[in-house]
Structures are given as C-alpha cells and as structure tokens.
Image: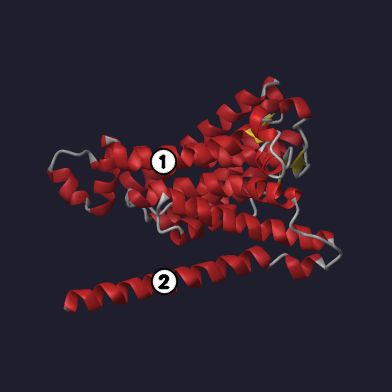
Amino acid sequence: MNIFTTDFFFSIIRIATPILFATLAAVIGEKGGISNIGLEGIMMMSALFGSLGAYWSGNWFVGLLLAMAVGLAEALLMGFFAFNLKTDIILTGTAINMIGSGGTLFLVKIITGGASTTNLITKSLQIPSINIPGLKSIPVIGAVLSGHSLLTYLGFLFVFLTWVLLYKTPLGLNIRSVGENANAASSVGVSVMRIRYITIGIGGVLAGMGGAFMSMYYAMGWSQDMVAGRGFIALAAQSMGNGEPLGGMLAALVFGFAQALGIKVSATGVDSNLVAPIPYIVTILALVIFALNQRRKEKKRYATALK
C-alpha cells in the first residue's frame, strides 16, 4: 500500500496547522522572555468556547472571535499572576493547563447535563475551506495545497507576519529587548510590564486560533483532552526551530508528518497502540538532534573565541 499519496501530504498540512499557531505563540513568547507552557490549556478552553460560540450564534466567525477572546483572556490572566503577583510563570502555566483539562470538562457537564463531548459543529458552522482557483488545477501540488481551512492559510501567512512583527517593527524591537535584558530595556524608557502583557496577549490570541481550528474544523466539535499535547509539541517545535518563525513552521510540519504517518500506518491494519507513540518519538528525536546541533555550534563558537 502506497502511504505517500497526495491525501497524505494534504493531511500533514492540516494536522500541522494547530501546532503552527501554538508554535508562533511560543516563538513570540520566547522572544519576549516568557516561557508560556500554558498553551495546551489555552487551546483547550478556546476550542470549547469556539464551538459553543458558533453553535449559539449560528455563525462560525463569531465562534472564532470568541475562541480568540478566550485565548486572550486566559493569557492575560496568566500574565496577571506571573507579572503582577510574581507567581512563578511555570506554575502559572501548569495551572492554566489543569484548568484547560479539568475546567473545560466541568463546564461541558454543566452545559450539556453530563455528556463529555459536544458534537455541535455542523457543516454550516465549520470554518470554511478555500479552493484556490489557479492552484487547484495544478496536478499533484493543487491537491496538496488547495482546499484547506481558512485558518490553515492564515497560519502560514502569520509565519511571515510574525517575522515582520519581530524584526521590522518598533514593537518587535521592544519585545526582543525585553526578552534579552528587561533592565536595559527599562533604562531607555521601554515599559517592560506593557510589553510583556502585549507579548503574552498575542500568544494567547494565536493559541486561541489553534484551539478554534481543533473544534471548528479538525474534529467538528469538542471532546475531553482533544488538543492531545499539541501545546507541548509546539514548545518543542519552537525550540527545534531555534526560536524563529520559519524554523518553527518547519518543525511544526515535521510533527505534522509524524502524526499523519501514525494515522496512515494505523489505517493499514497495524495495531494503533504500536503507532500512537510515533509523534512523541519523533519529538524526542528532533529535540535530541537540535540539542546536539546547538552543542556543536557552541563548541565552534568557543573554539573561534580562543583563536
């Protein structure tokens, strides 16, 4: 059976999309000196409210906006505890993840009267797919790149926009300055607190869009722990991509490939318990390769400095 079909490569891009949104959130956060491990929880809560918002309003766009608003609110709440109350940001992120897992289930049971899933998203409430006229007619490439969700195209556009934000705007300069040395940035008039809130807020909106993709396109509804570690995988992708938007995108595609491969192999009849670990094994191997590469670069820099 041929695994590497156009459908397989199409699924890589589809599966990589929520990871990409969370990866960009992690990249921006890391540039601002913020290790946002709460991405998983933010995506879970946004996925729930995105699907509920679409169902209640009868409009997918309202659901998407609500998911983004919830992502922003959770990120700002996380920032309040970390920046104002001086709570350890890792513990704060852990709490957000716990709320995203247990809190969403609690809310769903109250709203639905006991069910642990919400199959609310019909075709009319799904985030629309877009067929690009010129691209669609190209053999092979058209079948892979055309027909994806609107959010998929926005996600890859945001890779470029994130790079522009970080390296071509005054805000991006301030974000990187605060991330590199907050005291130095403050000494030249930069409001460190304001920049940190903006940084974590942008990350929350991006993670919210990733959550909306999960419940309003990928799964067509909400279920417990449906994000399935994608927020944590995004942190690995950010690290593997050397903290840059383009590198993060490529790493997200690698993890998308791993998950798509697991699904495809499972469909051939192989025991699902054997293929389920594939994405996580790839994550570990990718981080090992990244760490070894970074170590090699550090040794090269050290050797150059001694000359």
Q: Residue at x 52, y 54 (%)?
A: 250
Q: Residue at x 53, y 44 (%)?
A: 21
Q: Residue at x 30, y 77 (%)?
A: 299
Q: Residue at x 76, y 70 (%)?
A: 274
Q: Tell me which colouring the rendered structure shows.
A: secondary structure
In the image, residue 201 lies at what x, y percent? Answer: 41, 38
Q: Amino acid at mark 2?
A: Asn
- Res. 152 mark: none
- Quadrant occupied by the C terminus: bottom left
Q: Secondary structure at mark 2?
A: helix
Residue 61 or 131: which is nearer the viewer? 131
Total marks placed: 2
Q: Which residue is mark 1?
A: 162
The answer to whether residue 7 is above or below residue 291 is: above
Question: Dot 1 surroundings within 10 Å: few (below 14), some, or many (20 or more)?
Answer: many
Q: Secondary structure at mark 1?
A: helix
Question: Dot 2 surroundings within 10 Å: few (below 14), some, or many (20 or more)?
Answer: few
The answer to whether residue 152 is above or below residue 102 is: above
In the image, residue 288 lies at what x, y percent? Answer: 49, 72
> Of callouts 2 and 1, which one flags the residue occurring earlier in the amino acid sequence?
1
Left or right side of 231 for 27: left
Left or right side of 111 for 301: left
Residue 38 in view here: no
The answer to whether residue 237 is above or below residue 282 is: above
How far apart are the two marked residues, 2 and 1, measured between alpha carbons?
Answer: 25 Å
Residue 304 in view here: yes
| Mark 2 and mark 1 residues within 8 Å of each other at the beta carbon | no
- Res. 293 mark: 2
- Quadrant occupied by the N terminus: bottom right
Q: Amino acid at mark 1?
A: Thr
In the image, residue 41 lies at what x, y percent? Answer: 55, 48
